[in-house]
Image (cartoon, rainbow, N blue to C red):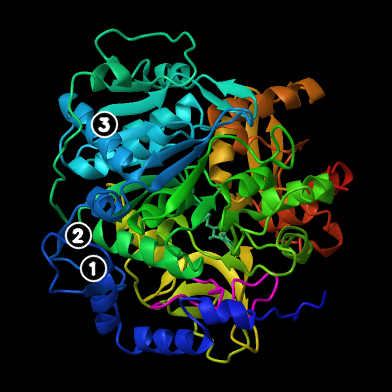
């Protein structure tokens, strides 16, 4: 397939879509010419308790960064996701829950039932002493109670911080500490792909020493034995028996925080990304509707986990704000076999299916025979997110899954952005495999020269991707550390939000993301800071020094390549490799486990002691012929040893 192959929307699709090409051009122009007027209108897509009079008050000026949308309006996010739908669609399924085992029956939770579940859950939290503004950590399997927990927090004005259930006790503890949470919500166990993770055990380990006053609310999912901390732990079902199901929604200011979500950066500990109530909900719901051409009655399936921002915006808040039927899937796409997703698409007549390129590659690798038996005619839009999609995977998604008739939306965004920034609209945008195409309404992407920071004005350009103006879904701050927020996103290129991604803009103005330009790697669509893996490695007694880089991986996109220098006197061995890899898994979680560990007697450093990652990247990519100048190294000979013992050949 030629790189410039384009796939225009069919006339039929465009004719029925919310937005066709002419309408996109018109709406986009309006959103840029007069953002105030544009968002004043579209802010009304959600229900406000007290309407806003102010729309936009934002500054990207370093030292003075401040982002406020719909500032004087008040609302309740849970009321928007539940109450306002009960009258017209109370019996419609809000959450369609698909359990891990293919033989277990799916559950349909109607909007009416959702109201009752969330009301009870909210009253339980109140009874435990949770108040407006308090932080609550949610560490849960993909079960409806995870969504109830989020919405219950939103209902009473508590700030949730969902921690992916694949994170280790240490990583969980750090996040409980990071936002000073008083309550952790979890389940006894999490079945996934036929295996069970002991979540409650992990919580106990996380809270054991330092957080002996943190209460824990436990959902019974598996019925397995759990260790109980008397006086601190409570079963949800027992607490629920003591409360009623009506809980009036708390009136929240638009800029009151809705949630914190930790994400890896290039340095130090993960950052607590803060999203607020009004702007976030407007943006999540609007992108959900337009990007997926969502229509009332559609069954929408995003395969992400609620532990990531994709699950927040496109399983819970966006779809529910729009009154959609949103699928929550507890399992994995390859269990019991690689036909699982397609079986469920057929069963539940899914209209929009949204997943990550890594999942597409994994399923493609299992063969078309897993797709062919199923009737996928309900599909209207296919989506991808998390990393650039390679043309082979795009082509397979298009032909084998979509049968060449379903538009694909490749959505570029970040935890920080709250919702899609670059994306095709399926009735409007001719797609090019591998390109996230064009900006969503109100988004002003710019390409800057990485070194000089100059804006590239020519249509064809390559450099770093920044945003010139704010949008309602933008993160507002780093939890407890506004100066880190400014330093990370607004210091390097003054006046712009810096995404951390490199990109190219082609002659048609289409954006092609080329990957991170900082020390963040993208493993299976998940962000991993190399510094985090390095600090886990050096915390092991055998390790004196470690450096971690990414390298191309056929399924994961990028794999984790670790160079490790051992303490003197210790000998490299396969056993030690395994020990170190398990160690990292335990310290952070399975997603951080190095794919390759190379023992290196020394690391390439400048005379001032700075590790030259450029060289380590080249060796890991098996591209050592293009290492470039090594003359500034303190000990150039270490490079020969690195090349001689390289692992990715
Ligand atoms: C980083 C953000 C937000 C959803 C999931 C990841 C990469 C995301 C794409 C895409 C190319 C993409 C970027 C971005 N990324 N979507 N469609 N094409 N790259 O969220 O963990 O905050 O990671 O994921 O590098 O900066 P995240």
For the residues labelled 2 and 1, the Cα–Cα distance comes to: 7 Å
Write the start and end of the magenta stretch as one range. Answer: 421-442
Tell which circle, 2 or 1, labels the residue nearer the N-terminal end: 1
Mark linked to residue 448: none
Residue 221 left/right relative to 55: right
At 47% from the left and 25% from the top, the residue drawn is 169
Local secondary structure at mark 2: loop
Q: Which residue is mark 3?
A: 121
Q: Main secondary structure of the magenta part?
A: loop
Badge 1 density bin: few <14, some 14–19, many ≥20, Cα 10 Å: many
Q: Estimate the x, y position of residue 286 in percent, counting from the top left.
A: 38, 67
Disc nearest the viewer among 3 and 1: 3
Tell which circle, 3 or 1, labels the residue nearer the N-terminal end: 1
Tell which circle, 2 or 3, labels the residue nearer the N-terminal end: 3
Q: Is residue 140 above or below residue 274?
A: above
As for residue 422 lying within the magenta part, the answer is yes
Does the residue at mark 2 contact the one at mark 1 (Cβ under 8 Å)? yes
For the residues labelled 3 and 1, the Cα–Cα distance comes to: 29 Å
Q: Estimate the x, y position of residue 353 in percent, counting from the top left.
A: 58, 55
Mark linked to residue 254: 2
Q: Which residue is mark 1?
A: 69
At 62% from the left and 53% from the top, the residue drawn is 356
Badge 3 density bin: few <14, some 14–19, many ≥20, Cα 10 Å: many
Badge 2 density bin: few <14, some 14–19, many ≥20, Cα 10 Å: many
Q: Estimate the x, y position of residue 620 in percent, counting from the top left.
A: 77, 50
Q: Quadrant of ligand 1?
A: bottom right
Residue 39 left/right relative to 157: right
């Amino acid at each position: 397939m030629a790189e410039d192959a384009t796939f225009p929307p069919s006339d039929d699709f465009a004719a029925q879509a919310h937005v066709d090409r002419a309408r996109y051009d018109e709406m986009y122009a309006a959103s840029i010419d007069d953002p105030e007027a544009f968002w004043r209108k579209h802010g009304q897509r959600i229900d406000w308790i007290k309407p806003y009079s102010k729309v936009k008050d934002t500054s990207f000026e370093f030292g003075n960064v401040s982002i406020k949308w719909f500032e004087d309006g008040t609302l309740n996010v849970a009321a928007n996701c539940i109450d306002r739908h009960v009258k017209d669609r109370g019996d419609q399924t809000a959450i369609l829950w698909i359990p891990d085992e293919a033989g277990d029956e799916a559950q349909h939770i109607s909007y009416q039932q959702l109201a009752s579940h969330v009301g009870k859950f909210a009253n339980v939290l109140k009874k435990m002493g949770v108040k407006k503004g308090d932080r609550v950590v949610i560490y849960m399997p993909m079960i409806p109670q995870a969504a109830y927990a989020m919405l219950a927090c939103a209902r009473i004005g508590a700030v949730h911080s969902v921690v992916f259930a694949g994170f280790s006790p240490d990583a969980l503890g750090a996040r409980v500490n990071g936002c000073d949470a008083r309550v952790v919500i979890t389940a006894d166990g999490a079945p996934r792909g036929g295996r069970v993770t002991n979540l409650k055990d992990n919580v106990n380990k996380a809270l054991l020493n330092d957080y002996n006053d943190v209460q824990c609310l436990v959902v019974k999912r598996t019925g397995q034995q759990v260790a109980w901390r008397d006086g601190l732990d409570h079963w949800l079902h027992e607490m629920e028996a003591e409360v009623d199901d009506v809980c009036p929604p708390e009136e929240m200011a638009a800029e009151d925080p809705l949630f914190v979500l930790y994400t890896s950066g290039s340095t130090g500990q993960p950052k607590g990304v803060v999203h607020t109530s009004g702007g976030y909900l407007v943006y999540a719901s609007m992108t959900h509707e337009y990007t997926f051409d969502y229509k009332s009655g559609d069954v929408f399936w995003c395969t992400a986990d609620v532990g990531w921002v994709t699950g927040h915006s496109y399983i819970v808040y966006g779809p529910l704000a729009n009154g959609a039927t949103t699928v929550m899937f507890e399992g994995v796409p390859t269990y019991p076999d690689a036909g699982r997703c397609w079986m469920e698409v057929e069963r539940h007549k899914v209209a929009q299916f949204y997943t990550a390129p890594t999942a597409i590659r994994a399923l493609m690798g299992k063969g078309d025979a897993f797709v062919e038996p199923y009737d996928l005619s309900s599909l209207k839009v296919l989506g991808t997110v998390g990393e650039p999609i390679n043309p082979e995977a795009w082509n397979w998604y298009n032909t084998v899954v979509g049968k060449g008739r379903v538009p694909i939306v490749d959505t570029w965004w970040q935890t920080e952005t709250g919702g899609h920034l670059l994306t095709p609209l399926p009735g409007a945008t001719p797609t090019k495999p591998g390109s996230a195409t064009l900006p969503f309404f109100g988004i002003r992407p710019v390409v800057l020269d990485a070194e000089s920071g100059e804006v590239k004005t020519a249509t064809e350009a390559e450099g770093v991707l920044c945003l010139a103006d704010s949008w309602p879904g933008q993160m507002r701050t780093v939890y407890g550390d506004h100066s880190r927020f400014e330093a990370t996103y607004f210091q390097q290129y003054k006046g712009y939000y810096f995404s951390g991604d490199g990109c190219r803009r082609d002659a048609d103005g289409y954006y092609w993301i080329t990957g991170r330009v900082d020390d963040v790697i993208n493993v299976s669509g998940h962000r991993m800071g190399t510094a985090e893996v390095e600090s886990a490695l050096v915390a092991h007694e055998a390790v004196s020094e470690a450096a971690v880089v990414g390298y191309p991986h056929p399924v994961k996109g990028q794999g984790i390549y670790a160079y490790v220098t051992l303490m003197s006197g210790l000998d490299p061995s396969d056993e030690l490799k395994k020990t170190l890899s398990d160690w990292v898994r335990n310290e952070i979680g399975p997603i951080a486990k190095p794919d390759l560990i190379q023992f290196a007697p020394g690391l390439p450093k400048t005379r001032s002691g700075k590790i030259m990652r450029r060289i380590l990247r080249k060796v890991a990519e098996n591209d050592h012929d293009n290492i470039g100048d090594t003359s500034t190294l303190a000990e150039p000979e270490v490079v020969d040893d690195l090349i001689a013992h390289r692992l990715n050949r």
